[in-house]
Image: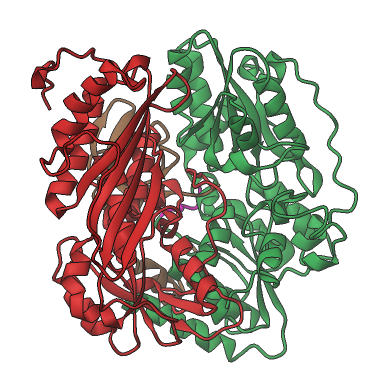
Amino acid sequence: MQLTLGMEGMGKMDKKIKLSDGDGGADTQRLIRNVFYKYFNDPLYNDMSDSFVFEAGYKRLAYTTDSFVVKPLFFRGGNIGKLAVCGTINDLVTAGAMPLFLSAGFIIEEGFGLEKLHIIAKSMSDVCKQTGVKIVTGDTKVVERGSTDGIFINTSGIGKVLGTYNPHWIKPGDEIIITGGIAEHGTSILLDRYDLGIQTQLKSDCAPLCCIIKGLYESLKHVKLMKDPTRGGVATALNEISTMQGLDIEVNEQMIPVKNEVHAICDILGIDPLYLACEGRMIIVAEKGCAEEVLHQIKALDNCREARIIGRFISGHYNMVYMKTIIGGKRIIPMLEGQMLPRIC
Amino acid sequence: MCLAVPARIITIDKIHAWAETMGVRQKVNIQLLNLPLPGDYILVHAGFAIEKIDEEYFCFLNETLYHMLEGTENE
Amino acid sequence: MNDTRTRIIERLNRCFEDIHDQDIRIMEVCGTHTRAISKSGIRYLLPKEVVLLSGPGCPVCVTPESYIDMAIEILEQEDVILVTFGDMMKVRGTYFCLSDKQAQDSKITVVYSPEDTLTIAAKNKDKRIVFIAVGFETTAPLIAVTAKMAKERGLDNLFFLTALKCMEPAIRYILQDTRNKINAMICPGHVASIKGAEHFRFITEEFGIPSVVCGFENQDIAAGICVMLEQLTGKRQIEFVNLYKRCVSSTGNKIAQSMLGEVFDVDDGDWRGIGTIKNSALVLNDKYKYLDAIKRFDIKVDKYSNSLNCLCSEILLGLKLPYQCSLFGSVCTPKHPSGPCMVSSEGACAAHFRYGRDGENG
């Protein structure tokens, strides 16, 4: 991406972020115009006021927030900006909401490269253009060198909850769908974080999933719950659901979609892909008897072609997640404990 | 202490080789092998090739059953 | 299930019919086997008479607290970068583990391959790099090669804090205890790749129990258990078997073995929760002693003393269950483990703590 300094007629910017870029004065205005307004610009919202005002004639709204501190900032298949937008969009989707507006708050370390900031902001804008979601308000602060790791981003989001979506208590027999291959984001991060001498085409699955809301629409009434398996992976997400619902879960190892490259890298490093994050996948709990129909509609969507029914809820006493293994055995899948690190043993 | 994966040598460059497993390439130290060649199947532990592997294993895992049923486990 | 797997499982199921009120304890002595067995879910398929025991086969879990204490003592000196496999980060010393120290802003780097230490040492000439060299005979040849490369490249800032152990003395220690209740042994497949299958024949020939060199796939483990049960129920004679011939030859990797001889001597070794086992450790020999971190940093090595009430020895022998240890659940928990049975997340005590049973699933 070529950086052309001094566009917008607002004067040239240095190549690195300075403390004064965050103190609210002329330098801050220059930064906002040259970077954030350049990419998030929309005439409807571009009046430089502190708050975004909109009409809310909807029955139910969903509102969420998340902060993003991923390392490394740039990874194969994305960067912290793309992650920040997709993450909050997907959190709204789990509420059955069509995402509408986002806020974006940036805490930037003094000395951060301006070119990197452009790349991050452009990535965020690209996702917005793809989904129709708009970044309508935000904030920028610059902190002293060493106070943060390059950049932290917070995004909040508002969405309109579809009338057909009515999450309710899960019962034994309800089934669990995953919308695609697991652990691709987490595995990509591991490759970029540790120098492993590994070459692969694998990249993060980071992607917005609003297509699920549009795609399911009527069938949303058969969906009891949605959850995106981010930090801690599918195993952690399923354990959280199991505990919340007071039911056991049985998953079928053979049905869980895992790319060959993820298998290979996890085998090399001794890491279980069930515990690695997905950033473009959704766990969907479908009412008993309706899972095939929901799956059929999901599979027609972009990013969801590998969707599968991977398990179901069963009555039990321990609120645990069990896996039926390839040889017909059974094992418990506990919550993630501690950091996932490469092993030799 | 035994985490190791099978791989196939693609290219060799002095004491290292690029070895491939399921679409992933890994740089591997080959100093513990006797005359490795491109095309050899190897066992990789912590970035080192520790042994060559019988080619049949790399594709199908039938050898175990063959030895069990034929009762020819011992050499 | 593919055809091979199906046939193995069917044959395994037929074995169960011949078990009549016979308690069968099968031990594995490899941390990777422990995990593979857990991952396969095979315990769920076994009748209650057949119990799979986890021996002292995880080099990380049998590393004494004093070793971690030494690593931390070195780390606290000036200009030191500690380099380690990920496995070692969460093992507790007397007070801290390495990940506690990393959180306190200490210089610790996790690597996948020992060879990475050479790059780190070359890039940080003003620092002293200390590698936490832990492993059994699968990993020891890699450390040997790395030490040799360090010597050849004239790297004067790379040192090794070794805790390398040998499998055979530990197996003998367990089987020589006449109280042991072990009926069969799964031999570590990748140690066997290095040392040769014949290295483990002594288990059957000297102690009269079935022993099988197994791989790590689901069907490898199922096949290994099946062969052992067939021997124990009289369907075939008791004998040593290599079921992992695709990766294990009878004599092993000669280059790796000679590398061990070139760089290491054998010495007594300290095993967490067990004590000192004679000739069970590999230490840098005279030619490579200058690379030894204990020597370089002049670290005082305390005589190893096992926690008085830790019952890991007996749990490992299959004599006691976790809840019979007075430390279990109080002094000794997964967060503050005393012995290897709790350090390893798949160890008998850790599994019992988590699930309330002896590592059984379902």
Is B26 situated left or right of C37 in this image?
left
In depth, the one of C240 and C73 nearer the eye is C73
Q: Position of residue C177 (x, y in %)?
A: 83, 59
> Which of the image's four quarters has the N terminus of chain C?
bottom left
In depth, the one of A130 and A31 nearer the eye is A31
Chain appearing in brown on the rendered image: B
Residue name at image x 24 percent, y 22 percent: A29
Colouring of the image: by chain
> Which of the image's four quarters has the C terminus of chain C?
bottom right
Residue name at image x 48 percent, y 84 percent: A314
Is C224 drawn above or below residue C104 in the view shown?
A: below
Please provide the residue range marked out in magenta. Answer: C247-251
Asked if residue A281 shows in the view, the reply is no
Chain appearing in green on the rendered image: C
Is C283 situated left or right of A306 in this image?
right
Q: Position of residue C223 (x, y in %)?
A: 48, 72
> Is residue A141 located in the magenta-colored stretch of the structure?
no
Q: Position of residue A39 (x, y in %)?
A: 15, 35
Asked if residue C13 shows in the view, the reply is yes
Is C199 drawn above or below residue A248 in the view shown?
A: above
What is the quadrant of residue C16 in the picture?
bottom right
> Is residue C249 located in the magenta-colored stretch of the structure?
yes
Residue name at image x 45 percent, y 51 percent: A271
Chain appearing in red on the rendered image: A
Dominant secondary-structure state across the stretch colored magenta: loop
Q: Position of residue C38 (x, y in %)?
A: 55, 66
Is C171 situated left or right of A52 in this image?
right
Is A77 drawn above or below residue C129 in the view shown?
A: below
Residue name at image x 18 percent, y 36 percent: A47
In depth, the one of C175 and A232 nearer the eye is A232
Is B2 situated left or right of B64 in this image?
right
